[in-house]
Amino acid sequence: MTKKKKPDNVVYNVETQKYDASLKTYATNVGAPFIEATDTVAWKKRSINKLNHKVKTRFNEIKEQYEQLMQEFDTNRLINNAKFSFEPIIGQHYHLYMRENGEHFLSIIAPNECHFNSLGSFYLNADQIWEKVV
């Protein structure tokens, strides 16, 4: 008994002995629409580049905020550890100086009114955080 060969336009799987045109990932007859695989590699590369740029930008923003916070912390620690014999008033400007022995002190006297070694002028804000005055 010989098996009769199917025509070329009929999709028949001889191994499973079934018609499987609907299971194919490609067009199987002349009237089927043209299927073109889209190139997703370029889209993926663009997406990866955008994500990398976004992450790098956000990281730099967070790093800058961290550095600013640490600068604020160091400034406040320095002033709070300095010697002063008055209670600072919120909204007022004060001046930080260093003595010859390395000791820091806070004063209401401006640098142009004295000859101390000035480390800067500072402002006490409403949150009782010291801000450097430029």
Image (tube, rainbow, N blue to C red):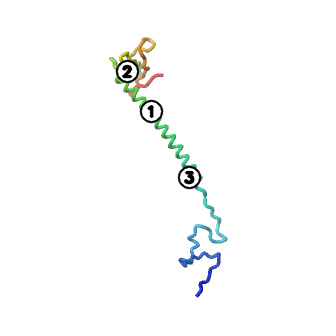
Residue beneath disc 1: 67
| Name of the residue lying farthest toward the left | 85
Q: Position of residue 105 (x, y in %)?
A: 36, 18
Left or right: 58, with 125 as reference point: right
Residue beneath disc 3: 44
As helix, strand or loop, the secondary structure at mark 3 comes to helix
Q: Can you tell which of label 2 and label 1 is closer to the viewer?
A: 1
Task: Say if mark 2 contacts mark 1, CB within 8 Å.
Answer: no
Quick one: label 3, few (<14), some, or many (20+) residues within 10 Å?
few
Amino acid carrying label 2: it is Ile
Mark-to-mark CA distance, 2 and 1: 27 Å
Q: Position of residue 102 (x, y in %)?
A: 37, 19
First in sequence, mark 2 or 3: give its number: 3
Task: Look at the picture and state if 66 lies above or below 75.
Answer: below
Quick one: label 2, few (<14), some, or many (20+) residues within 10 Å?
few
Q: Position of residue 20 (x, y in %)?
A: 57, 74
As helix, strand or loop, the secondary structure at mark 1 comes to helix
First in sequence, mark 2 or 1: give its number: 1
**Residue 77 visible in rendering:** yes
Q: Position of residue 7 (x, y in %)?
A: 64, 78
As helix, strand or loop, the secondary structure at mark 2 comes to loop
